[in-house]
Amino acid sequence: MKTMFFIIVFTVYLLANFYVFRHFWIAMPPSNVGRIALLSFAVIAVTSFFISFLIGDSLPVGLTSLLYKVGTAWFFILLYFLMIIAAKDLLGLSNKLLHFMPSDSITRYTRDNWVGLGLMVGFVALLMTCGYLKYQWKVRVDLPVQIYKTFGDTISPRSLRIVAITDLHLGYGIGEKEFEKWVDLINAENPDIVLIAGDIIDNSVRPLKKGRFAEVFHKIKAPMGIYACPGNHEYISGAKESFDFITKAGVRLLRDSVAEVDSCFYVVGRDDKSNPNRKSLKELVAGLDHTKPIIMLDHQPYHLEEAEANGIDIQISGHTHQGQVWPISMITKKLYERDHGFVKKGNSNIYVSSGIGIWGGKFRIGTQSEYVVIDVNKKK
C-alpha cells in the first residue's frame, strides 16, 4: 500500500514538473546556455527532493540538509507555477471552446514568451519571499482560559502559565540555531510549564543526534517541566530512536500515559494515531481525580467532542499546520472540524495550533508560525 502510494506521488510530481518546465522551455529565448541552465536546474530541483528522503541518512549531514531545503522549497514553488500556468492554459482552452474573447486578444495573454515568463517568475519570487518572511515571524498567541477547577487548594488558588508549541520539525530543514531563537521566545514568557503537542522531529533523528539539539532543549526554563506527546513524524523518523532522543533532551514523553504535576493537575499525553493500538481517551482518564484540572496533548485534532465527554479541561493539538500555504489551507479546513484556532466544547477548551515550525520549504502564505501562551485562571 505504501509502495503504491509512493509510486503515485512520484508519478504525479514528475508529470507536474514536466508540465511546468515544458512551458519554461517554450517561453525562454532559444539560447543553448539558457536551456542548459534550465535543464540543470530542473534536474537538481526535482531529484534533490527524492535523494534527501531516500538516501539522505547515508550522505553527509550538510549535503542532505542542502538537498532537503532545495527539494522541499521547490515543492511549494512548483505549486504556484503550476497554478498560474494551468490557469493560463485553461483560459486559452475555454476561449477556443466558448469564443468569449477575440482569439488574437486571448492569445496575447496566454501564449508562452519570455516577457510572460519573466513576469511570472518575478511574481512567484516576490510571493515566496513574502512567504519566507511570514514564516520567520513567530506570532505570539495570547490565550487566557478560565476553568471551573483550581490549581492548589481552594483557600489559596493559583494561576498557571503554559507555553504550548507544536510541530517543531527539527532536523535537516530546521537547525539548532533557529531552535535556539525559539527557546529564547519561550523563556521570555516565564512559563510554569512547557507543553509540546507532537512532531518534535521531522523525518530523521540523525541530524539531532549529531547536533546540539538536546543541549538546546535543556536551556528551556520551566519549573514544572517540559511534557510532550508523540506526533506522526516521531514514527516516520523511527519511533524508538525518536523517543530515546526526546527523553535524552529532558522532555517527559507521555505515550498513552498521565503525569500528575505538583499533586494539583494532570497532563495526559495521547499516543499518535499512527499507533493503531493506542488507548482510548476513556481508558486514559479512568481513575483520575476529576476535581483536579486535566490538560491533554493529542497531536492530531480528530474527534474533538471526546474532550468534553471525558472531562478534559484544556486540549492542545497541532498536526494540520493550517495547510502552511494557500490553497492547501482550504483542504485542511475541509478535513478537520477545526484546523487552527480555539474552540470551546462544554467546559473543554481546545486549541489547534498551526505550529511554530514547518514541514519542508520555509513558506507561510495565508497562515502563521506561532507559539501559544495560555494563562489559566489568571486573576484580572
Image (cartoon, rainbow, N blue to C red):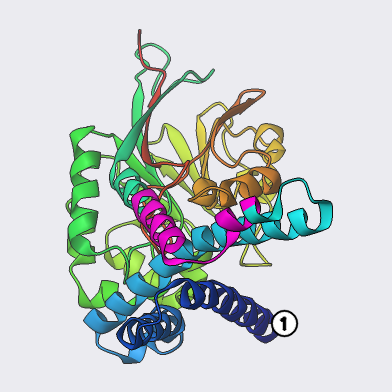
- Above/below status of 307 relative to 197: above
Question: Residue 319: horizontal and vertical position, in percent?
Answer: 53, 53
Q: Residue at x 24, y 48 (%)?
A: 182
Quadrant placement of the N terminus: bottom right
Judging depth in this view, the residue of 150 and 322 nearest the camera is 322
Question: Residue 15: horizontal and vertical position, in percent?
Answer: 61, 78
What stretch of residues is rendered in magenta?
105-127
Q: Amino acid at mark 1?
A: Met
Question: Residue 25: horizontal and vertical position, in percent?
Answer: 47, 78
Judging depth in this view, the residue of 201 and 307 nearest the camera is 201
Q: Which residue is the site of mark 1?
A: 1
Residue found at the very far right of the displayed protein: 98
Query: Which SS type dominates the magenta stretch?
Result: helix
Say if residue 54 shows up in the picture. yes
Judging depth in this view, the residue of 84 and 239 nearest the camera is 84
Mark 1 residue crowding within 10 angstroms, few (<14) / some (14–19) / many (20+): few
Is 182 situated left or right of 357 in this image? left
Q: Residue at x 28, y 47 (%)?
A: 136
Question: Residue 172: horizontal and vertical position, in percent?
Answer: 31, 72
Say if residue 318 shows up in the picture. no
Magenta span includes 377: no
